[in-house]
Image (cartoon, helix red, strand yellow):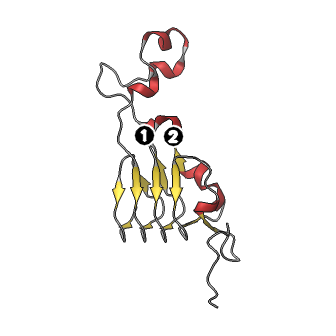
Amino acid sequence: MYNIPDPDQVYPNQFGTTCFLKNVITAPNISVGEYTYYDDPLDPAGFERNNVLFNYPEFGDHLTIGKFCAIASGVQFIMGPANHRTSSATTYPFAVFGGAWAGRVPPHMDQLPRKGDTVVGSDVWIGRDSVIMPGVSIGDGAIIAA
C-alpha cells in the first residue's frame, strides 16, 4: 500500500553513497536500528571496518545505535581498547609488543580502563568528521557536530 524504503536493503537509493548500517554490520558487539544510515561517497558499506576503531569484541564493550539516525561521512566511533592504562607508572602498553615484556606485566586487555558501552539514541544526526569516544551516551534527537 505504501511505498517506503525496504529497511533490509543495503543501498536504499540510486546514489550508492548511503547504506542502511544494520545490513552491513557483522561484529557481535555492534547493533544498529532500522533505517539508520551512513553516508560516504567512497565506501558507505565499509563503515564497521573504517569508522569503528579499536573494536575488539573480546574486550566486552558494545556500540549501540538506535533507529532513524543519520551519520555523515568521516564519523568515527572509538572503542574501549583505544585507551591506555592510567593508574600505573607508565601509560606505555608493554604487553602489546610481546616477548619478555608480555611475560612480566598483566595481560593488556585487563589493564585498560573500562569506559562502558557507547550508546546512540534514535533520531540522532552525527555531523561530518565527528568523533564519538568510548562510553559516551547520546540521547534521542541529539545533533552532534564536529
Give the quadrant of residue 4.
bottom right
Disc 2 target residue: 54
* Vertical position of residue 137 compared to residue 61: above or below: below
Identify the element where label 1 is drawn: helix
* Vertical position of residue 10 compared to residue 46: above or below: below
Q: Find residue 23 and report its horizontal and vertical position in percent.
A: 64, 61
Foreground pick, 145 / 87: 87
* Vertical position of residue 127 compared to residue 54: above or below: below
Do tag 2 and tag 1 residues touch (Cβ < 8 Å)? yes
Identify the element where label 2 is drawn: loop
Q: Looking at the image, which residue is at 62% across and 89% down?
A: 2
Foreground pick, 111 / 76: 111
Quadrant, the C terminus: bottom left
Marking on residue 80: 1
Marking on residue 111: none
Q: Looking at the image, which residue is at 42% across and 17% down?
A: 106
Q: Find residue 46 and report its horizontal and vertical position in percent.
A: 64, 55
Give the quadrant of residue 87.
top left
The local crowd at label 1, few if under 14, some if 14 to 19, many if 20 or more residues have their Cα within 10 Å, is: many
* Vertical position of residue 131 compared to residue 145: above or below: above
Left or right side of 1 for 111: left
Q: Find residue 128 and report its horizontal and vertical position in percent.
A: 48, 63
Quadrant, the N terminus: bottom right
Q: Residue furthest front?
A: 1
3D distance between C-alphas at marks 2 and 1: 7 Å
* Tag 2: amino acid: Phe
* Tag 1: amino acid: Gly
Foreground pick, 69 / 97: 69
Q: Looking at the image, which residue is at 52% across and 46% down?
A: 29
Q: Find residue 104 and report its horizontal and vertical position in percent.
A: 44, 9
